[in-house]
Image: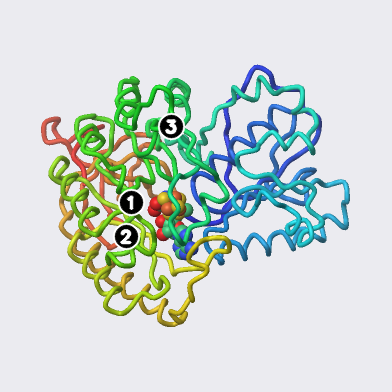
Amino acid sequence: MNGSRTIPLRPAASPARLPLNGKHFYIWTIGCQMNAADSAKIAAMLLEAGYQQTASESAADLVVLNSCVVRQAAEDKVAGRLSSLIRLKRQRPDVSIVLTGCMVTKQQERLREQFPHVDLFFDPSDFDKLERVVPELGAMKDDLAELPHYYLPEASTSGVTAFIPIIYGCNFLCSYCIVPYRRGKERSRPMSDIVREVEQVVAKGVREVTLLGQTVNAYGHDLEPTTNLAKLLTAIDAIPGLDRLRFLTSHPKYMSDEIIDTMAALPSVCEHMNLPVQAGDNEVLRRMRRTYSRDDWKDRIAYTRQQMPDVTVATDIIVGFPGETDAQFQRTHDLLAEVGCDKVHLAMYSPRPGTLSVRWEDDIPHEEKQRRHQALEQLQEQLCTERNARRLGDRVEVLVDDQARGRWSGRTRGNTLVHFADDRNVMGQLVDVSITRTSPWFLIGEPAVDPHSGGAISPQISNDL
Ligand code: SAM
Ligand code: SF4
């Protein structure tokens, strides 16, 4: 879920947009999809205020860096990027530099000392502060409140998938994690707003929506009256024209039978679940303050597989947590081998200032963290090689969202990447593909031939990984 990128943003137009003012903005984003969604929101606000987006910071009047500090490596990249802007500010003092995202703390004195060339720091729950460098926004508050929260990634490709935040913040306090300190308590968005946004994006041609939240399956518990993710999924599934519905990231504690049963019952909800385990040893889980056991996590996967036999599972694991012994790591390794996840997001433990675990010695040497990381990578490769090899000859439904080097690419409902060649323009289409070659990380195929139509190519069938 991490990586630095410049997101080509395509926010919705609003009736209140001010005339172009000749100014340009540039946004650089690193981190999770939630950051990408925040950047989309900022871009939408600036477009409303009459700014235009540029792909180069040297051409910009306003540079926004949207930061991530979940791990030290991400923080270092942001710091590097910030330092590189010192020259720009020296050459063009009129350029406004803004820092947002999880690097921004409530107390900003230290940041101001460290990066004096930054004009504005604002935390991700406080978009209104942008007004300090873009005064036009002040008079537009009511209209801005109406702006959507979604983003449609990568304008150069299909515009066929959209990401929509449904809950902000996190009420957990995992001992290693900085997110709750930077993103605050859980705040669910009203269901009617979310449903309206899904309707809007579907009307624009989007066929797949991913609902976002740090604990997406805690959705609605804080609303009055309370509601839940199962009810939201049901409301969204009823929207005509939406083919695929996904959500991430779920917390095992909130992965209720009701949500799983609803996933299984609704046609648009994809057979894919993102359920981080973080560690396979109960003592490590306890010290991580994860609030569940290894068996709890396994039970949720087993129940989901019982209700949705084709479901694929993604998880997150941290290796080298303080005090993690060889035997404890081995239990994580064995759990992964036993359960056989389809995708694992691996991270080496990185102490984060302000969290609980930073008080404990970071006693696993870097080389040992790397060894554990590699061991899980190898295991994952082996598991994925075996799993994908079983797909040879299968017919899968692919939602095409990219084209490169003469072939089309897209994902199955189970989120497996598939490449295939096709003379037709199939961008944004659901295409049935017969798998002819497999690898651990993707499948290769060709358009499936429908036996009932004398060799014609079938436009759709739902048979999935
Ligand atoms: N809310 C999700 C959950 O409960 O698992 C994850 C959100 S977190 C921002 C994304 C991932 O970053 C986590 O799943 C974890 O694996 C990783 N992560 C968070 N803090 C970390 C740290 N201090 N060191 C290494 N990895 C970390
Ligand atoms: Fe961080 Fe834990 Fe909240 Fe996930 S659930 S965002 S890991 S505190």
Residue 222 circle label: 3
Residue 417 circle label: 1
Q: Give the structural element (helix, strand or loop) at label 2.
A: loop
Q: Which residue is mark 2?
A: 441
N-term-proximal mark, 3 vs 2: 3
Residue shown at 29% from the left, 30% from the top? 230
Residue shown at 58% from the left, 64% from the top? 353
Circles 3 and 2: CB atoms closer than 8 Å: no
Q: Quadrant of ligand 1?
A: bottom left
On the rendered structure, is 305 left or right of 190? left
Residue type, mark 1 in image: Leu
Residue 194, picture quadrant: top left
Residue shown at 21% from the left, 50% from the top? 301
N-term-proximal mark, 1 vs 2: 1
Residue type, mark 2 in image: Trp
- Indicate the position of residue 316 as horizontal and vertical percent values: 36, 58
